[in-house]
Image (cartoon, rainbow, N blue to C red):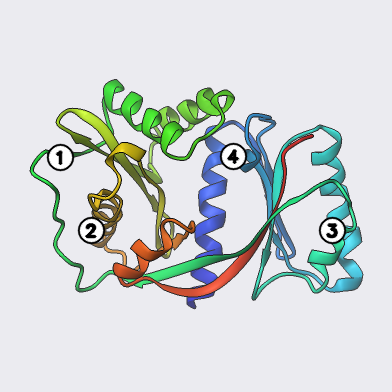
């Protein structure tokens, strides 16, 4: 499997997981992959991840999905991959005139898992895998504050986290770091079929500047290497991009995101 295919597989596995853990539905064919959870708290809980068809078939394929999501007032996103989307998808989406928020050029990055640097943490910091109820509460609090997630999404993220820890064959492995007992940084490792995904890397604002995001990314990478993975995948935010470059990640492709917040 080439690296671009690994990236798409990773994204699909992540959102299949969200759909499953929230009791939603995921539909996948060669031409289209989309999901809905019915949740209205956050656009990332409903979306379209693949639109791979000829331009003349785009309206037939995409219009029914658009109508379902839009008519139910479900916030959602639509991904336009640089290397694997229908010609004219951007123009098709813009023609809907629903007030998209558009995120251009999100880096999709990859790094091999050989020759990883040593994990180095300040002496005040303890790193654990999320297991206990306290671990879950700490991880969730850092997620909400670190990413400035809307408060109505807290119960949905709590359900995702709790359910992910009780699956028979867990796909998600979560980490939390505490600075002198206070949770400060988190990350998540996704166990996809062909590549390890790094997600949810964030640090509370008051603890930034100590290399904790880099360390939690590396912790997930080391766990992936220990599980036998050869390649790691992540999708970089602007703030995370310099950190991931320092760790040796390279941009393989980019994606544009079209977001409708339900209003």
Q: Are marks 3 and 2 in contact (CB under 8 Å)?
A: no
The residue carrying mark 2 is: 222
In the picture, the disc for residue 211 is none
Answer with mark 1 or mark 4, whichever residue precedes in sequence. Answer: 4
Query: Which of the two marks, 2 or 4, is nearer to us in this view?
Result: 2
Q: Which residue is under mark 1?
A: 125
Mark 1 touching mark 4, by CB under 8 A? no
Q: Residue at x 83, y 73 (%)?
A: 54
Q: Nearer the viewer, residue 60 or 81?
A: 81
- Disc 1 versus disc 4: nearer the observer: 1
Classify mark 2: residues with Cα within 10 Å, few (<14), some (14-19) or many (20+).
many
- Mark toward the viewer: 2 or 1: 1
Mark pair 1, 4: CA separation: 33 Å
Mark 3 — residue? Answer: 94
x and y percentages locating residue 185 in the rendered image: 30, 41
Give 132 or 1, whichever is nearer the viewer: 132
Distance of label 2 from label 1 (alpha carbons): 18 Å
Categorize mark 3 by other alpha carbons within 10 Å: few (<14), some (14-19), many (20+).
few
Q: Residue 140, relative to residue 127: is it above or below?
A: above
Q: Is residue 82 above or below residue 235?
A: below
Local secondary structure at mark 1? strand
Query: Dots 2 and 1: beta carbons under 8 Å?
Result: no
Q: Nearer the viewer, mark 4 or mark 3?
A: 3
Q: Circle 4 sits on which residue? A: 19
| Disc nearer the start of the sequence (3/2) | 3
Sooner in the amino-acid sequence: mark 4 or mark 3: 4
């Amino acid at each position: 499997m080439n690296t671009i295919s690994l990236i798409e597989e990773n994204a699909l596995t992540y959102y299949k997981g969200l759909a499953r853990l929230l009791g939603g539905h995921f539909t996948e064919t060669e031409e289209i992959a989309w999901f809905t959870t019915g949740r209205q708290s956050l656009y990332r809980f409903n979306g379209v991840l693949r639109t791979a068809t000829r331009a003349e078939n785009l309206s037939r394929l995409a219009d029914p999905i658009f109508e379902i999501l839009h008519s139910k007032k479900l916030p959602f996103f639509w991904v336009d991959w640089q290397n694997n989307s229908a010609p004219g998808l951007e123009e098709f989406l813009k023609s809907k005139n629903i007030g998209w928020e558009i995120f251009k050029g999100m880096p999709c990055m990859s790094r091999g898992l050989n020759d990883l640097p040593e994990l180095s943490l300040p002496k005040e910091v303890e790193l654990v895998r999320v297991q206990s109820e306290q671990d879950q509460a700490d991880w969730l609090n850092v997620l909400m504050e670190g990413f400035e997630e809307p408060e109505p999404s807290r119960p949905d993220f709590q359900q995702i986290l709790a359910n992910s820890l009780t699956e028979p064959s867990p796909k998600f492995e979560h980490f939390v770091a505490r600075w002198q007992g206070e949770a400060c940084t988190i990350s998540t490792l996704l166990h996809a079929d062909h590549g390890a995904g790094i997600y949810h890397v964030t640090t509370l604002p008051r603890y930034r500047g100590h290399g904790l995001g880099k360390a939690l990314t590396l912790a997930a990478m080391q766990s992936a290497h220990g599980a036998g993975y050869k390649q790691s995948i992540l999708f970089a935010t602007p703030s995370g991009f310099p950190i991931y470059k320092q760790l040796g990640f390279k941009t393989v492709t980019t994606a544009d995101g079209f977001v409708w917040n339900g209003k």
